[in-house]
Image: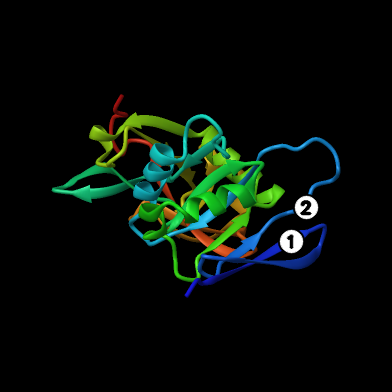
Amino acid sequence: MAKHAFFELWNGGFPFVLEGEGYERVCFLVQGGNGGGVRDMWYVIQTITGKEQELADIIEKVMAGEGQKYEHCFVIYQECVRRRNGRRELYVETLFPSYVFVETNQPEEFFLDLKQVPRAANFLQVDGCFWNIYEEEEEFLRRMLESCIVKKSNKMGINCGQAYVIHSSLVWVNEEGQIQGAEGVLGFYLNKIVKQRLRKRSVVIEIPFCGRMRRIRLGIRLKGDFCEAE
């Protein structure tokens, strides 16, 4: 028996429902346009934690090409610092576990196509959501990508051709060990820090993201931690 899909769309502040056959239930949020020209908007696909890059790679391999319904599809990573064998070293982790980002102006068509790709469907949550990024959240992500570095995966331990990695923010502290300033993306959010762990070289900021207040851990570094690698 065919399954039903209920797409909850948000159009100009009013929810409405479309019903179709052959798909599992999904939560689908779309921000209404203003009647003017259509621009690509950013959306989130929620997937299985640890399968983010695999899903993005499937989308790039199967759905790209003539008639593709998206502009970009990507996973965001970040640099972090840890101590190993008495020395500090860089490592990379997923910044937003379980999230894949898509830029598209055809969200309905894109997601319906995605659900019909068998390999991709395996990585979608049973009640997985696909929703839009609001303007202020997009600004946060764009600031992230402005401090992004692109490295080959064989140097980053990521199984993809290239990896989009947010550079860890250089910070400086006062005599009490409190962060007073920062370069990179953290410089925009110093007043949003709710927790700092200098020894672990990380901070936690609290900002609105994906429809609610979220705490996001960002990697930091101090001057003299190590010589910058190329």
| Percent of width and height locating residue 9 | 70, 62
Residue lying farthest to the right in this orientation: 35
For mark 2, what is the residue?
32
Q: Which image quadrant is residue 6 in?
A: bottom right
Mark 1 and mark 2 in contact (Cβ < 8 Å)?
yes
Task: Find the distance from the CA under tag 2 to the CA under tag 1.
Answer: 6 Å
| Percent of width and height locating residue 150 | 40, 30
Q: Residue at x 32, y 35 (%)?
A: 224
Residue 167 is at least partly visible in this image: no
Residue lying farthest to the top in this orientation: 230
Classify mark 2: helix, strand or loop: loop
Instruction: Establish if 125 lies above or below 88.
Output: below
**Residue type marked 1:** Trp
| Percent of width and height locating residue 225 | 31, 39
Looking at the image, residue 169 sits to the left or right of residue 107; the answer is: left
**Residue type marked 2:** Gly
Nearer-the-camera pick, 161 or 179 = 161
For mark 1, what is the residue?
10
Instruction: Establish if 159 lies above or below 228.
Output: below
Residue lying farthest to the bottom in this orientation: 1
Looking at the image, residue 29 sits to the left or right of residue 69; the answer is: right
> Which is nearer the N-term, disc 2 or disc 1?
1
| Percent of width and height locating residue 63 | 46, 40
Residue 92 is at least partly visible in this image: yes
